[in-house]
Image (cartoon, rainbow, N blue to C red):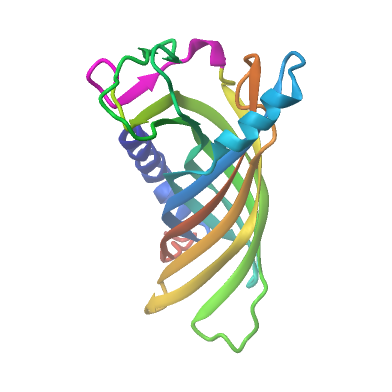
């Protein structure tokens, strides 16, 4: 699924390449390591004990995404950035100390493995993967003293469509059905097909070749504004990303051409 999304990003960008050359701006290509988490609400009232238990179980999940954007120069210090991203959000829920005949998950079955005498646990990795169209306003905040480097502050939003959702369960200390890894559909999750997101962060650009090629790093905070799903247990996600990539500034084609 991830490779298909990367190919789609490349295809979209190639379609707009010729038109983009007529606009003063730059291409931004990056991979996006991400750590995500979330908090949970419930459709119906539940006890404080259940809420506290889930808070202890839920933790950060690492993932990776990708992006391709075009930064339109509004002035020497301001840019409008538009493009396409593969966003990989979610969190990990760690459940521990299973006993004999405990239900592991309806799609996995019950605990039969008694071969391990130590502790056991399952990491349930909740994965929500989107194609995202961001629109970001970017303004320079560094001074003239930085000759080859520039720092920008970004703020904006995006809309996203769900391309894949599942739960990747990783068993530690035991196995079930002869396996240690399961991909669970969890049909009762009822994931939302669309979301809207808020983004903000900083970007450091550094010139590496002539006047047209740069590298950049961009730490960002990403907050989906809607529920990720609409089951009995509802997930509200957030993520920290650290984009790493390069910038290419094409030569502008004159109107006479």
For this view, does 152 lie left or right of residue 103? right
Front residue of this view, candidates 256 and 63: 63
> Which quadrant would residue 137 be assigned to in this image?
bottom right
Q: State which quarter of the image contains the N terminus.
A: top left
Going by the picture, which residue comes out furthest to the bottom? 145
For this view, does 4 lie left or right of residue 58? left
Residue at horizontal 72 percent and vertical 15 percent from the top? 43
The relative height of residue 32 versus residue 178 in the rendered view (above or below) is: below
For this view, does 91 lie left or right of residue 164? right
Q: State which quarter of the image contains the C terminus.
A: bottom left
Q: Which residues are magenta?
A: 176-190
Q: Is residue 236 visible?
A: no
The relative height of residue 148 versus residue 10 in the rendered view (above or below) is: below
Residue 144 pos. (x, y %): 62, 86
Residue 161 pos. (x, y %): 54, 28
Residue at horizontal 64 percent and vertical 78 percent from the top? 142
- The stretch drawn in magenta includes residue 183: yes
Residue at horizontal 59 percent and vertical 72 percent from the top? 151
Residue 124 pos. (x, y %): 45, 29
Residue at horizontal 63 percent and vertical 59 percent from the top? 201
Q: How many marks?
A: 0
Going by the picture, which residue comes out furthest to the left? 178
């Amino acid at each position: 699924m991830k490779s298909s999304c990367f190919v789609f990003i490349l295809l979209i960008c190639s379609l707009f390449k010729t038109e983009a050359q007529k606009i003063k701006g730059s291409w931004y290509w990056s991979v996006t390591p991400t750590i995500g988490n979330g908090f949970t609400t419930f459709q119906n009232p539940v006890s404080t004990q259940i809420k506290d238990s889930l808070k202890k179980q839920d933790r950060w999940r690492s993932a990776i995404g990708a992006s391709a954007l075009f930064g339109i120069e509004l002035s020497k210090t301001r840019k409008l950035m538009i493009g396409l991203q593969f966003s990989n959000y979610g969190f990990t829920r760690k459940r521990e100390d299973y006993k004999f005949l405990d239900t592991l998950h309806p799609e996995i079955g019950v605990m039969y493995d008694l071969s391990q005498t130590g502790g056991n646990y399952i990491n349930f990795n909740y994965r929500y993967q989107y194609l995202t169209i961001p629109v970001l306003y970017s303004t320079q905040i560094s001074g003239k003293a930085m000759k080859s480097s520039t720092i920008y502050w970004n703020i904006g939003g995006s809309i996203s469509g769900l391309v894949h959702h599942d739960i990747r369960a990783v068993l530690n200390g035991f196995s079930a059905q002869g396996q240690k890894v399961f991909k669970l559909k969890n049909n009762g999750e009822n994931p939302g097909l669309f979301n809207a997101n808020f983004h903000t962060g900083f970007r450091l650009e550094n010139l590496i070749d002539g006047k047209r090629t740069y590298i950049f790093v961009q730490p960002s905070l990403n907050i989906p504004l809607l529920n990720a799903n609409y089951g009995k247990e509802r997930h509200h996600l957030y993520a920290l990303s650290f984009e790493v990539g390069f910038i290419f500034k094409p030569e502008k084609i004159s109107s006479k051409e």
